[in-house]
Image (cartoon, rainbow, N blue to C red):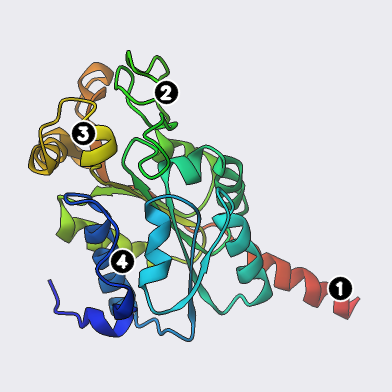
Amino acid sequence: MERVDYDKYLRTSRIPHIWCPGCGHGIAMKSILRAVDHAGWTKENTVWVSGIGCSGRITGYVDFNTLHTTHGRAIAFATGIKLANPKLNVVVVTGDGDGTAIGGNHLIHAARRNLDITVVLLNNNIYGMTGGQCSPTTPQGAKATTAPYGNMERPFDIAGVVAACGGNFVARGTVYHVNELEKLMRQAFLKHGFSFIEVMSPCPTAFGRRNKMKNAIVMMEDLKERSVSVKKAKDLTDEEREDKIVNGVLLDRDKAEYTDLYRQLIEQLRGS
């Protein structure tokens, strides 16, 4: 792992952060910063956008052009930024509640358009900041404040949903597999078109305590034990894959990007 001067990318006056002990979001943030450093992106040509939730605090800590927006609307703001100035590198940091519930429609349509932004979704399977309610990715049977006897609903395979909607790059990683996660981030940032990374991140406070997971170490070990590579997952039956976390690149293709098509249309109309 390359050495990175994190301080040059952080608003150090806002540190220490507010995340609970054992939360994986700090690990995810450092992975993003290393990928940004590797991509050669600067503070001047990069915009970070977030919504509401634990993940949304990241835009307060990074020293870039940042927007901390309303709940579920981060991708909508990012769409406006990218269309106004396609030369900017735009990163959306969102959570499983912010990005797949109230913001789910924005997510699928940004993928459908193949807009050149990167969405990093930190999935901790719960509404961590706002009370521990079920999110669309809460596992069936898991407990939450809105499901004290266990969640009855089947969760989204959110990376699968995004892959089905469009876009050029979809991947999944965990904060336990930090080296692999950074590589996925790098691939996503350098990909032209819509790219999406689902990052599995433990929430010891809102999820772990309610579901008898003793501490953050146990939750990290769970990420390790349930993870399987895309290659190995192909040899598993549907039943064997049921509780697994399939990590790696799930989709990588090269479809026409939205702002390129938009610019071509403008040039066409000017010439007609």
Amino acid beneath label 1: Leu
Q: Secondary structure under badge 3?
A: helix
Give x and y (percent) for residue 202.
23, 43
Marks 3 and 1, how far apart at CA: 56 Å
Marks 1 and 2, how far apart at CA: 53 Å
Q: Which residue is mark 2?
A: 146
Q: Which mark is residue 44?
A: none
Q: Is residue 257 visible?
A: no
Furthest-right residue in this view = 272
Q: Quadrant of residue 133?
A: top left
The answer to whether mark 3 and mark 1 are in CB contact below 8 A is no
Q: Secondary structure under badge 4?
A: helix
Amino acid beneath label 2: Thr
Q: Secondary structure under badge 1?
A: helix
Give x and y (percent) for residue 1.
12, 71
Q: Quadrant of residue 18?
A: bottom left
Q: Which residue is mark 1?
A: 269
Q: Which residue is mark 4?
A: 32
Q: Which residue is mark 3?
A: 208
